[in-house]
Amino acid sequence: MNKRKTFGFIYTFTCPAACRHCCFACSPARTEKIDPVLVEQIISSPYFIQEFQTVFFSGGEVFLYFDEITRLMEKAKGHYQIQCATNGFWGDDPVRAETMIRKLKKCGLTRLIVSYDEFHADFISATSIQTILKLCKKYLVAIEVQIAACQSSWRLADTANVLLKSITEISVSEASVLLVGAAKENLCEKDLIYEYRTIGERCLGSDAITIFPDGSVYSCCSPVSYSTPHLRQGVLRTGMGDAQMQQVIENDSLFRSLVKYGVNGTCGRRWPNHPVSQKERYVNVCDLCHHAFSQIPYKEE
C-alpha cells in the first residue's frame, strides 16, 4: 500500500514564550505534555508505518524535551520522513545549537521549521534564529522559516529584513493569524489578513492528522483544529492494539465529507436543523470551517 499521510504530535503546550497570537495559547505556565511511551507506541505501530509517510513534532516547544524527542526520532528513522517545528530559543548559545543540529541530523531529521515573526520576536532574539539558519546551511539540514502575520504586524519582508543575510537560500512562508487560542483574546477580526476573493469551501487538508498531549486525534492540520471539537476523531491511549488505533484514525468521515462537499455542504447534510450564518469575509477555508462549526452544538461521544 502506498504511504499517504502525515501525522503530527503537538508534543506539549509548554513553551518558553507566550506569544500573543499562539493558536494553542502555549506558555511557560502550561504543563500539558504527551506521554512519550504513547508516542513510541504510535510511531512503532505496523499500521502507522504502513499508512503514513511523515511524522511531525511540534508544540509548544518540543526541544524543551530534546533528549526525549531525539530518542523518538531514532525510533522513527527509517520508517518516516521526520519534521520538527521550533521557536529557536536554543539558538542563543551557538555551541549548544551546533551540538543540537548535529544530533538532529544524525537522528534522521528531514526538515526543521522555525517559527519567527513579530510575535515571537517579543521572546526570541533574531540572533538566535540567524545562528540556527547558518548552522542548518553548514550541516545541509533543510530548513524553513514560517511567519504568522496580521495587518498591523511584521509581514514577510519585515521578518526577512530582520534576519538579513542569513535568510538567503532559505524557504520562507507566511500565513495569516486566525482568531483561536491566545489570538482570540489579544487580536481582533479587523486586523486579520483576508482573502478578497471567494474562498474555496472544500478542505484542502493536506491529508494530515494531529495528535495532542492528551492523545486526542483531530482530522486537521490547521491552527483551528483544537478549537473545533467537531473535528475530534477519538483518543489514542497507551496499550491500544493496532486495530484499535486504526479504528480511531479511520474515524474520519467528517473530514472526507469536508473534502467532498465543502464546509457549508457538509453542515447542510449533517445538521439540517442548524442553519449556519456567514461572515462577510474569511481569512481562508479554515476560518470558514471554524466559524461554521462553532454554531453547531457539540456532544462528545
Image (tube, grey):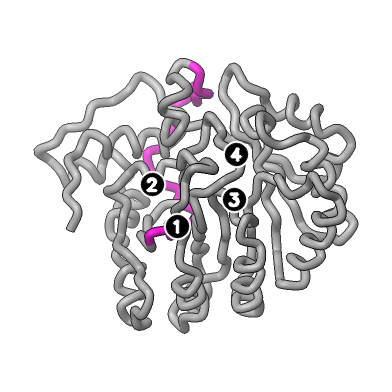
Is residue 300 placed above or below 155 in the rendered structure? below
- Please identify the residue farthest to the front as the structure is shown: 29
Picture residue at 86% right of the left edge, 55% below the top: 95
Is residue 78 placed above or below 6 in the rendered structure? below
Q: Which residue is mark 3?
A: 61
Residue 99 placement (x, y as % from top left): 82, 62
- Badge 4: residue crowd in 10 Å (few <14, some 14–19, many ≥20): many
Q: Secondary structure at mark 3?
A: loop
Picture residue at 46% right of the left edge, 78% below the top: 41
Which quadrant: the C terminus? bottom left
Give the residue type at disc 2.
Tyr
Q: Which mark is residue 210?
A: 1
Give the residue type at disc 1.
Thr
First-in-chain label (1 vs 4) = 4
Q: Is there a contact, CB below 8 Å, between mark 4 and mark 3?
A: yes
Q: CA distance from mark 1 to mark 3?
A: 16 Å
Q: Which residue is mark 2?
A: 226
First-in-chain label (2 vs 4) = 4
Q: Nearer the viewer, mark 2 or mark 3?
A: 3
Q: CA distance from mark 2 to mark 3?
A: 17 Å
Is residue 254 placed above or below 238 in the rendered structure? above
Picture residue at 52% right of the left edge, 73% below the top: 3
Q: Is there a contact, CB below 8 Å, between mark 2 and mark 1?
A: yes
Give the residue type at disc 3.
Glu
Q: Which residue is mark 4?
A: 17
Give the residue type at disc 4.
Ala
The number of callouts visible is 4
- Please identify the residue farthest to the left as the structure is shown: 273
Q: CA distance from mark 1 to mark 4?
A: 22 Å
**Range of residues picked out in magenta:** 191-214
